[in-house]
Image: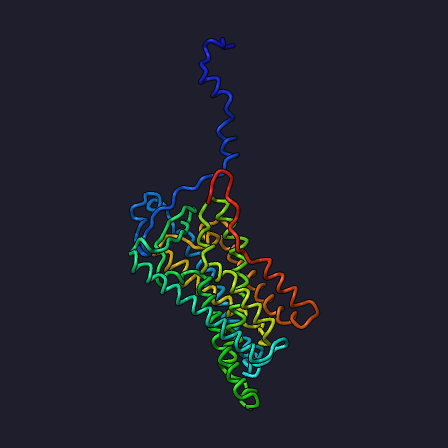
Amino acid sequence: ETPESTVSPAGRAESLQPPAATLTARVPRMCKPARGPFAYGEPWWLDDPIEMSADRFRGRRRQLCFLLGVAASCAGVVAYTSHAGVLVWSITPATFGQSSFVLLPALVVYRIACAAFIFGLCASKLVSDYVLQRGAGAAGARLNHFETLDRTEVAFLDHGVWRFQGLTSWGWVLLGCYFLVAATLSLRVAAAPEAAQHEEPDGAACVASLLLGVSSAYAILITLTVTFVLIPSKHRKGLSTEGFFTPFALSQHNANLAMVVGELLCGAVPIDPWHLPFALGFGIVYLCGWHQTVRYNRTRTLMYHFLNWQHPRSLLICSLLMLTLAAFFAFAALVGQLRLRPGGAPMVLCAALAVMRWRRPPPLAGKGE
């Protein structure tokens, strides 16, 4: 036994401290400061020894081949159903003048307002960037934070068309295209309600019906993913979630679903289940043609960490993502049927409000955000 006189006060204090592992378990893991900010396309990784020593492209080819295989299957389904007469393009302009709840003038105003809001927000993004940079130069540029494959943050100067790099913006523009075409068709019907040509299949009407199905599925997917996957995951890691709570982001992540629900409840445009391959194809074009290839090559970061091709279950995650999108597509088609049932419309509205997120998560213990 060591005599008390030989143990210094510092030694006694040290002996009373819990093990380091216990302290680590009690205190939330702090993230490293984000690298940057960098301009998009700036090869910041050339000066980063970790990035240069790691094989970041291992597994990407396998993931891309899997996604392209799904795209080929979707093309095969479209070709077969078209040849067999199952996929029929028979939507008429008159469909866009029908509603179970509102008058045609109100439906026209709603669609015009939605189209104006969507494209007005897109224009305001570009104009606000121009004003900020003109007034303050590079110091006025917004910062956006993305993650490397090992989930460390890199900050970028967010400006110009790069502000439309996310799937949210792609789906937002797609939804705007629907409302633009739908508003045009509604105006045609309102201008000449008795015209016989409104009862004949029309190419623009068929395209609008396709756009509604695809954009509805992605509006649901985007809102749910942001609310229940991206924000909670970043928050747990101690990473910044500020980008999700800007006025632009809140509008795109919540108003997209609100406008889709309003259209599905008030309008009468059907969603054809056989349009599902087009919805899957849209997502695959985004992934293979942009996010996993061109965008990654220019930034060495991912916007959506669960798309990491080096994850041991990468292909399973992609499969589940496709199945989830198919389920949301089916749900969007179901909403059109629920609107006519007692209590159906209030139930859909309550569900939509429940999945929207407007408030920031509470700060982690010992760390403000």
Q: Position of residue 111 (x, y in %)?
A: 52, 74
Q: Determine the residue positioned at 35% across, 59% down.
A: 159
Pick the front one: 296 or 102:
102
- Say how many tags the image has: 0
Is residue 263 in sight in this rendering? yes
Q: Position of residue 42 (x, y in %)?
A: 30, 54
Q: Position of residue 136 (x, y in %)?
A: 30, 56
Q: Position of residue 26 (x, y in %)?
A: 52, 34
Q: Which residue lies furthest to the right in this view?
A: 342
Residue 361 in the image: above or below residue 8: below
Q: Quadrant of residue 243?
A: bottom left
Q: Which residue lies furthest to the front in this view?
A: 135
> Is residue 36 found left or right of 356 in the rendered image?
left
> Is residue 137 found left or right of 223 in the rendered image?
left
Pick the front one: 190 or 229:
190
Is residue 320 in sight in this rendering? no
* Colour scheme in use: rainbow
Residue 339 in the image: above or below residue 46: below
Q: Determine the residue positioned at 48% across, 77% down.
A: 181
Q: Quadrant of residue 92?
A: bottom right
Pick the front one: 215 or 326:
215
